[in-house]
Image: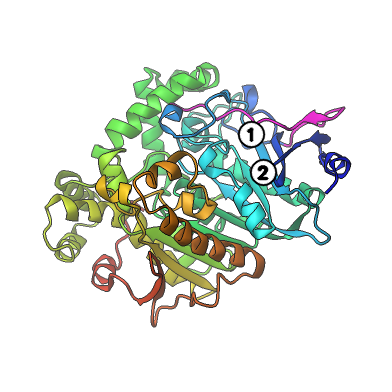
Amino acid sequence: MSTATAEAGLTIQTSEGPVRGRVLGSTRSWRGMPYAAPPVGELRLRMPRRPRPWRGVRDASRFGPWAPQRARRLLPGAGGSTPMSEDCLTINVTAPREPAEAPLPVLVFFHGGAFSSGSAAMDLLDGSGLVTSGNVVFVAMNYRLGALGFMDFRAYSTPERPFEANVGLGDQVAALEWVQRNIAAFGGDPDNVTIFGESAGATSALTLMCVPSAAGLFHRAFLQSPAPGAVYGPDLTGAWAGELLGLLGVGAGGAAEALSEMSAMSLVAAVSQLTGRITPDAQPGALSLAPVVDGSFLPLHPLDAFAQGKAQQLPMVIGSMEREGELFDKLNDILPTNKDRIEKMFALTEPDHRERVIAAYRGYPHKKQAVEIGGDAVFWHPAIQVAEAHSQYAPAWSYRFDFAPRAARLAGLGATHGMDLPAVFGNYGSGLGKALVRLGDRRTAANVGHRFQSGLLRFARTGVPGPMWPKYDTASRRTKIFDRYDRIELDPRSARRKAWNGYRGFR
């Protein structure tokens, strides 16, 4: 490709105005493009609005600001020079350097971070490897986090200052609408959009399958370690909103004004207290930053929507890590991974299930089994519920990611939450990926990652993750296990699955 051709392909006309990107290695990249109006002033805690058009060519060479958060310094390789701002609703597109003759499959990624941290600017989430390996167009966006994106303050609305729920999810819908309006100009196929994400990002993608306004905006979903139960009704989410205001010293009478005027970082600090110290012990197993079943934007709990066949009936891959809970026990203590929290979790949800579940974890209450219960309760078991329900209505595939490099094993983490990210992005050369292979296993990690990434890319192109990956069904429950040597298992952890059967958690 000549320099002149490359330069000519960098200015793109979007629905709001022209943008100019830059060439990065073998890709073209456009960053920091607004997909919605700044969610500030009267638009704080409101659903997103279309961005205003601009005149002239907008520079799209740098990432947009991170959503306000506290944990950015804990995220390795995370673009520390990029500022934080409440004006954070921007989207990034990466495409092959050589424009294709036919529209390319589109991969849209939602970052994780417990709905409180993270950004599309993280080095670990660089999609250029996916673009060059798979000849696809990669999209990622920032969305509102914390109290500004995932708390339900509707009870404190006034006629002069209304608030809405699920505005962080609304941002994601707005980003997908932007993709439908604009991605053809970047070489992508708006009729072949695969959404994928990890952790809170996967929970978002899964929930969007149950959001009526998201119907038709995407065509496949690849879900890495979602927490499908981390969606709650208005009673619980409203109570958390009240607790947050209490931490801020705000009474119900002055809440509308306070929520409109207080700084974003004041809300971030209060959320840190609520999610780090209060909720994990008061309601173990629940995550107080989460989507809410509001009856309109999200009419049904996702687990109920999937069970009733009311989720979008499109191809879906869903899976989890072998040892989901270890990361949280050692580094982010928000799950029920000790005896006190586990006993309280069952007491608050379904006491009749306690004995049956505990019996499936021989050795409990020893730490290993307690950590396994916490990870299974939040991630593994509800993901199995989704797979078995969805398989009744649409193609579904299940996996478990068991590979852990030597550094992760020596740290006592094993194949824990988030360690599939360098695999799916092929990013073992920077950030977390580099740390994981610093003590060896680089070649094996790259091979496992290639196979995992290839499944995602095949799925994006064809709707099937590969010939050696059978569909999931409730008769055989065939599950692909990614490890040094991949294999297919029939109904892995069947005793645990049966023990958890029927458990509904905090719904």
> Of residues 37 and 193, which is closer to you in this image?
193
Q: Position of residue 233 (x, y in %)?
A: 42, 47
Q: Position of residue 35 (x, y in %)?
A: 70, 38
The residue shown at (44%, 19%) is: 266
Q: Which residue corresponds to mark 2?
A: 174
Rendering quarter of residue 274: top left
Contact flag, marks 1 and 2 (Cβ < 8 Å): yes
Q: Which residue corresponds to mark 1?
A: 89
Note whether 255 is above or below 9 in the view shown: above
> Of residues 46 and 454, which is closer to you in this image?
454
Q: Position of residue 389 (x, y in %)?
A: 45, 70
Separation (CA) of disc 1 from disc 2: 9 Å
Direction from residue 311 to residue 278 in the image, left or right: left
Q: Dot 2: within a 10 Å radius of its alpha carbon, few (fewer than 14), some, or many (20 or more) residues?
A: many
Rendering quarter of residue 48: top right
Q: Amino acid at mark 1?
A: Leu
Note whether 105 is above or below 279 in the view shown: below
Q: Predominant secondary structure in magenta?
A: loop
> Residue 309: within the magenta?
no
The residue shown at (48%, 44%) is: 112
User: Which residues are the magenta region?
Assistant: 50-70
Q: Dot 1: within a 10 Å radius of its alpha carbon, few (fewer than 14), some, or many (20 or more) residues?
A: many
Q: Amino acid at mark 2?
A: Ala
Whether residue 412 appears in this view of the structure is: no
Direction from residue 57 to residue 448 in the image, left or right: left
Whether residue 204 appears in this view of the structure is: yes
> Residue 54: within the magenta?
yes
